[in-house]
Every structure is written in structure tokens, then in C-alpha cells.
Amino acid sequence: MGWALSIVVVGVAVAVAEIALENRRSAQAGTAAENAMNPSTAPGGSAEKVVHTDAEWRKLLTPEQYRVLRQAGTERAFTGEYTDLEQTGTYACAACGAELFHAKTKFHSGCGWPSFYAAAAGDRVILRPDRSHGTTRTEVLCARCDSHLGHLFDDAPDQPTGQRYCINSVSLKFIPDPPATTKASANR
């Protein structure tokens, strides 16, 4: 009878540990979802990795965002919201909110997608070889959530880096700079 009681006690201890682990995972998933939608609340800003299940990404993103960001799709040329936008601000990842590009590095390349000559910081994007479509290109991914953003090309000799980050508008969220405060309005 002693050994049977030991087995029951061990079984209960394992069950309690599994429940505690599941509660911890649920709490972390909730925090990750909050951080994905509001990177300012993420510990360490945009450096914290954002991980979701496929089902969670489908709930968080529009169908077009999901197709491009999570399935490495491409939006049609000259249809994106930010292709011709000329405004000061920052371009963030549409999936997780990480700051990716500054408007000051945006230029008109004529390719049909927003083009930038540099990322906001070297660690904001991941570059990896893309051998799809019978050619080798460099894929650009968000370093925070691993979402597909577009591709990098070395075909912009008129730009400071010689590079063109060709990024899908649907992969981005534009955050305009706050209006400048003039001395006249500050003295009122």
C-alpha cells in the first residue's frame, strides 16, 4: 500500500507542476500579444522576440498582411499605401510594431514599392538568402517577429549605401513625427 500512495503523490505533484507551467505559458502568451500590438510596453523596447502560433497571427493580421508577412508574399506593384508617401516619420513592422525604417532614408526608385537605402539600425532586420523564383535574392525579415518585409537589392548607386530595401507597404505601419512646436506657440 505504501508504494501505491507514493505513486498517487508523485502523480499529483506532476499534475500540479503541469498546471503551473501551463499558467506561466498562458501569462507569457498574453504578454507577448500585448507587446506585439504595443512595442512600448515590451521589456527592452523592440528587442524582445515576438512569437505567435499560426492561428494567433491569422487573428492579429488582415488576410493580405498574413499572406505577405507570414507567407512571404508580395503585394502588387504601385498599389501600396506608402509607395509615394512623402512625410517625416518612422516605418514600423505591421505585425509587431518594431521600428524598422526612417522616412529620411526613403527614396523613389520607381520599382512600385517603398524603397529605403538603410534600415533604422542594423539589428532591426534580418537578411537571408532567398532562392525562390529561380534566382538568388536577399530577403528582409523583421528581427523581432521574423515577418517577411521584402527584399534587398544592390541596385541603387545614387543612394548613400548603394542599396535598395524594397519593402511591401502592407508589411509596414507609418508613424508620423509629431508636429514641430514653434517658439510662437510655445510662448502662448
Image (cartoon, rainbow, N blue to C red):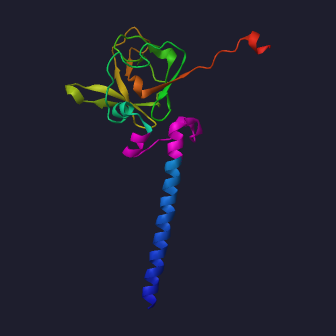
- Residue located farthest toward the bottom when viewing the structure as drawn: 1
Count the marks: how many?
Answer: 0
- Among all residues in the image, which is located at the extreme right? 188
- Horizontal side of residue 58 vs 175, given as left or right: left
Q: Residue at x 64, y 16 (%)?
A: 179
Q: Residue furthest left?
A: 134
Which corner quadrant holds the C terminus? top right
On the picture, is 157 further left or further right than 22?
left
Tell me the quadrant of the picture where the N terminus can be found. Answer: bottom left
> What residue do we see at 19% from left, 26% from top?
134
Residue 44 drawn in magenta: yes
Name the spot of residue 56 as percent of width and height, x first.
42, 44
Residue sitting at x 52%, y 48%: 30
Q: Is residue 135 above or below residue 9?
A: above
| Residue 42 magenta-highlighted | yes
Residue nearer the viewer, 96 or 164 = 96
Rendered view: 114 above or below 27: above
The magenta segment: 31-59
Give the image location of residue 109, x and y in percent.
37, 11
At 37% from the left and 10% from the top, the residue drawn is: 157
Say above or below: 141 vs 101: below
Q: Position of residue 82 (x, y in %)?
A: 44, 18
Q: Residue 3 location in percent, x, y?
A: 43, 87
Give the main secondary structure, helix, strand or loop, of the magenta stretch: helix
